[in-house]
Image (spheres, grey):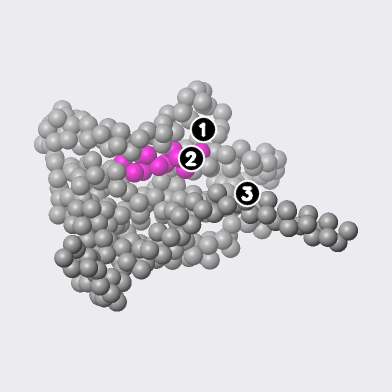
Amino acid sequence: MTRKMTRYSLKSQATGWLLLMPAAVFLIAFTYYPTIATLAKSFFSQGTALRPSQFVGLENYASLLDDEVFWKVARNNIIYAGITIPISIALALLMAIWVNGRLPLRSLTRISYFTPTILPMIAVANIWLFFYTPEIGLLDQTLRGAGFNGHNWLGDPNTVLGCIIVVTIWKESGFFMIFYLAALQSLPPELEEAAKLEGASRWTYFRRVMFPLLMPTTLFVMINAVINSFKLVDHLFILTKGGPDNSSSLLLYYIYEVAFSFLDQAYASTLTVILLGALAAIAIAQFVFIDKKVHYQ
């Protein structure tokens, strides 16, 4: 009996490992190995056909501290994330509350809010080129019709990052709205009825009941928003290529330039390690400080 149980247990374990193996192989091949390889490469110099790569320790990280472009790009990314994340989440919540109510053509309104999300990134960039192009763009045409002069929106360092921010908010708000809409539809209707019987206003119900119950969704959306704010490449490649004078360049696009335009994969690995470290620190901070407010008590 004991042998049969042991044989059955081993067979069950083998079956479990075989079922997990495809996912484990992909996880190791496309997540763990690239991460470890990138970290290791950041401690070596960029090799050439005549001079092989050599171990340089923290030299690449020291060069990063003196890299003015890196600090400018990091500042751009902080501004970009600091504006797009709260505005996208706030708009998503407002749109979800709006389309969750009783309004005419509700399904059409939901589709119109969600449509920017399903458009390819390159298509979105080309659509917004129609708005931002000098002289012939819709914004310049509208300004001229109102008696104002046109403006090179993507060519001015003072406006180019704001233009990229607008595109991102327009595309991501509808995506986050879907999660809030699903969460709102799972809330018990008795809570709102009880709040009305108690004489609570809509704002009180939202602040004291609805929003606390939506905190798990808010945490999930916030984590996705943070990740998205550090991985923008497609829009920049089509709209600005990081210009003018790196005024619209963000960290991941700068990594792309260093690796594939400047062909310095060692320094690009160093930048990638810094980016991954920053994302990990932000994620830990979110779980430590926000997770306490996730469950309504």
What amino acid does circle 1 point to? Val
* Residue underneath mark 1: 99
In terms of secondary structure, where does tag 1 sit?
helix
In the image, is residue 176 above or below residue 273? above
Q: Looking at the rendering, which quadrant does residue 41 occupy?
A: bottom left
Q: What's the residue at 79%, 60% (across, down)? A: 6
* Residue underneath mark 2: 177
The part of the chain drawn in magenta is 166-178
Q: Viewed as shown, does residue 129 lie left or right of 278?
A: left
In terms of secondary structure, where does tag 3 sit?
helix
For marks 2 and 1, the one nearer the N-term is 1
For marks 1 and 3, the one nearer the N-term is 3
As measured in the structure, the alpha-carbon distance from the residue carrying label 2 to the one carrying label 1 is 9 Å
In the image, is residue 122 above or below residue 15? above
**Residue 168 magenta-highlighted:** yes
Q: What's the residue at 23%, 53% (across, down)? A: 260
**Res 180 label:** none
Q: Which of 190 and 235 lies nearest the eye of the viewer?
A: 235
**Residue 24 magenta-highlighted:** no
Please provide percent x and percent y for residue 112: 42, 29
Q: Nearer the viewer, mark 2 or mark 3?
A: 3
Please provide percent x and percent y for residue 191: 68, 43
As measured in the structure, the alpha-carbon distance from the residue carrying label 1 to the one carrying label 3 is 42 Å
Please provide percent x and percent y for residue 91: 43, 43
Q: Are marks 2 and 1 in contact (CB under 8 Å)?
A: yes
What amino acid does circle 2 point to? Met
